[in-house]
Image: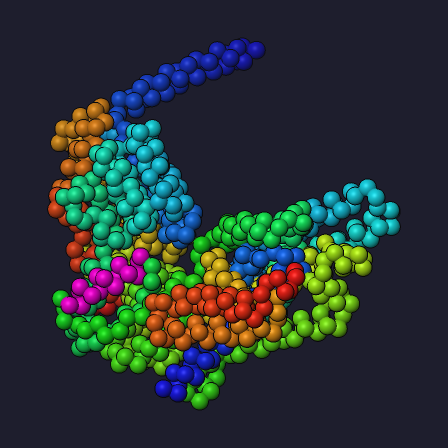
Amino acid sequence: MRTTMKRGFIAPGVSALLAAVSISSAAMAQDKPELRIAAIIAVTGPASALGAPERNAVELFDKTWSSRTDLPFKIKVISYDDGSDPTKSVSLTRKAIEEDKAHVVVCCTTTPGSMAIIDTVSAAKVTMISMASSLSIVEPASARPFTFKTPTSDKLMLQRTLDYMKRQGIKKIGFFGLEDAYGEGGLKELQNVAKDTGVELVATERFARQDTNFTPQALRLKQAGLDAAYIHAIPPSADLAHEALKRVGYTGPIYHGGGSSINAFVDIGKANVEGAIVGVGALNVYDQIKKDNPLRRVLAKFAELYDGAYGKGKVDLFAGQSWDAMMLAVDAYQRATASGAKVDDLAATRVAIKDAMEHTKEWPGVNGIFNITPTDHLGLDKRSTFLSQIKGGKFVLIEE
Amino acid sequence: MLDTLLFLVADGITNGAVYGLLALSLIVIYTVTRVVNIAQGEYVTLGALSFASALSGTFSVLSALVAAGLAAFALRDVAEQRLTGTMRMRIVLSRALWILIVLATAWLANLLPGSYWLAVLASLVATASLGTLIYRLTVEPVSDASPIVLLIVSVGVYMVLHGTAVVIWGAEPRSVPPAVDGGVGLGPVFVTYQSLWICASSLVAMIALYLFSERTLTGQALQATAVNRTGAQLCGIPVSIAGQLSFAIGAGFSALSGLLLAPLITANYDMGLPIGLKGFVAAALGGIVEYPTALVGVLLVGLTESFSAYQVSAYRDVVVYLMVIPILLWRNAVRPPETHGH
């Protein structure tokens, strides 16, 4: 009887104490400024193959960073799905800026989506970090002061690839690519880079994502007398184009652009794509690059974290793109507050974040080492690109 | 030069065979139900994807969905008031058997992963049954509406099926192993066994359809409905059953073309629409009513596509779809619409 009385007395006492503690910690937490990042990703719709791993990485970021209490600030991640629809990207961006009071908008998965929201973020003076490939999103930086992006550009990848081709004694190449925005963008860059490096582009053939027959174009390329074929597409069509070239008896080397640097490329192509030379990001070959490369530690950590959450060997390029976007935002915010940005003034903080972004120096991310300046809003150099060859179903780094 | 020609012809014919199955599906459905089925390509997708998942030994969600849909309609039919006890019994038994077949094929394919024929069977049964469900759900309630309403309904069906494929299987393409690996060198041209298999299967399927419609009573009833709906109804042919049957044949044929094509181009949620549209171009040559002319049409489409891709790869689809205009002009000249009543 006595003991129950005692317990009955103690229990409310303890809970009152707990409540007091939780209130004070809540109050303390409220004292900390909050960094709000809105991630608008194409989880559904045609770009969902890219959007799904991007969303995974954002969730991973949310799990590992939002719960941290050792930071001088809190992080809040707001996730939206734009369904691969640029119109929806714009309305969600507006919502994130006005209702959610986001400091940074990580958007979008696709180039059309990213292009569509530029006016909205510029007007609101909010930093956006895109995960899409086209360089036109951030260029020219003077006209798009609030726009940044994380994926390496086709231009860098092509410079790397064509330099390598030239050293291999390749003089005449043929382009075999998608006829959509991605393929046409690649072709345009290829024409420029080919001119600069002195490699001659002698044939241009196109196909569509949903084509059922790639042989006619492959025949044409074979008959053009190429030293090498360059395929600019994404799986599965990149695999099918590769197979078609082999089927018509083309025996020269076959190069692939960055679109093929995902696991699906070898999963679908299997033995057929053995020997393909693929331009890849650091993530594909993170365990093969030199030990002293500053990227190696960052990559290994991210790969371990991602594979731990989603299964071994699941980590891919697109996951790295949203991850870097989130991490860049945190880094910029940290530096902005350290240099005395007023955190209770939303507009001032937003601009301070953009200024800090423009002074990112030697920052190692998953996509490469970022050196963002007021004139270069991508900030990657050729250290972000690698060449690999498919051997035994793996991307094997080509030592240069 | 001869090599090139042979290559182009071989691939043109392979693709033509695939479009051929599509064209026949479109014609069967249009003649019996007057639906110009925009959603036809989606059965290609569903056939290929459910085949891929059956082959890899995962239970196809599509089979479960179809079984549930069949059960729902069985309940509705049994609840019909004017039925006698024995008729009810017959409905219950026949529908139970049907549902059982759908689930059993899916389950067997799941039990023995990698078995080609079981996977083919599971995929065909599920997709063909889905065809009847789509008919009952979307066409039957408005079966007296004008063709334009039916066309718009089929656009809606396309959107729903397209979305369903993404929800069930995701956006990742799946590679599908061919029936027989490798190929044979016909002179300078290397033709995969799968291409030969596609041509042979299409031919067999077409002959089977011909025999079915000429030699069986059910087939004759379908033909009668196609020629004159009211007349067929007056003769005691149940128009609803004819419609369901035509949708089942159409969906089944398209699914067959999908699972035949999948080893060549992988199975993915996005593959159906362009294939369906090209089948449509071929069917247009026969006014979506004549089978033999449509078969000429598919060869024409397959070869045109192949040769235009060789000559001007950037415009090959433009060339193929542009064919519709001369085809329509030609049809109008040979057979003005008012002379054949449908």
Examine the rendered structure and indicate whether residue B276 appears above or below residue A222. above
Image quadrant assignment for residue B7: bottom left
As drawn, is B78 to the left or to the right of B160? right
As drawn, is A270 to the left or to the right of A93? right
Examine the rendered structure and indicate whether residue B215 appears above or below residue B280. below
Q: Is residue B115 magenta?
A: no
Q: Magenta part of the protein: which range?
A: A181-195
Q: Residue at coordinates 17% horizontally, 58% vertically from top-left?
A: A382
Place of residue A131 in the rendered image (x, y in percent of width and height, measured from the top left): 29, 48
Place of residue B121 in the rendered image (x, y in percent of width and height, measured from the top left): 64, 65
Place of residue B319 in the rendered image (x, y in percent of width and height, measured from the top left): 41, 68
Which residue is more in the foreground, A31 or B187? B187
- Magenta stretch, main secondary structure class: helix
Place of residue B43 in the rendered image (x, y in percent of width and height, measured from the top left): 56, 59
Which residue is more in the foreground, A332 or B135? B135
Going by the picture, which residue comes out furthest to the bottom?
B187
Residue A83 appears in the picture as rendered: yes
As drawn, is B304 to the left or to the right of B207? left
Q: Residue at coordinates 82% horizontally, 48% vertically from top-left?
A: B88
Residue A71 appears in the picture as rendered: no
As drawn, is B120 to the left or to the right of B268? right
Image quadrant assignment for residue B240: bottom right
Q: Residue at coordinates 58% horizontally, 78% vertically from top-left?
A: B200
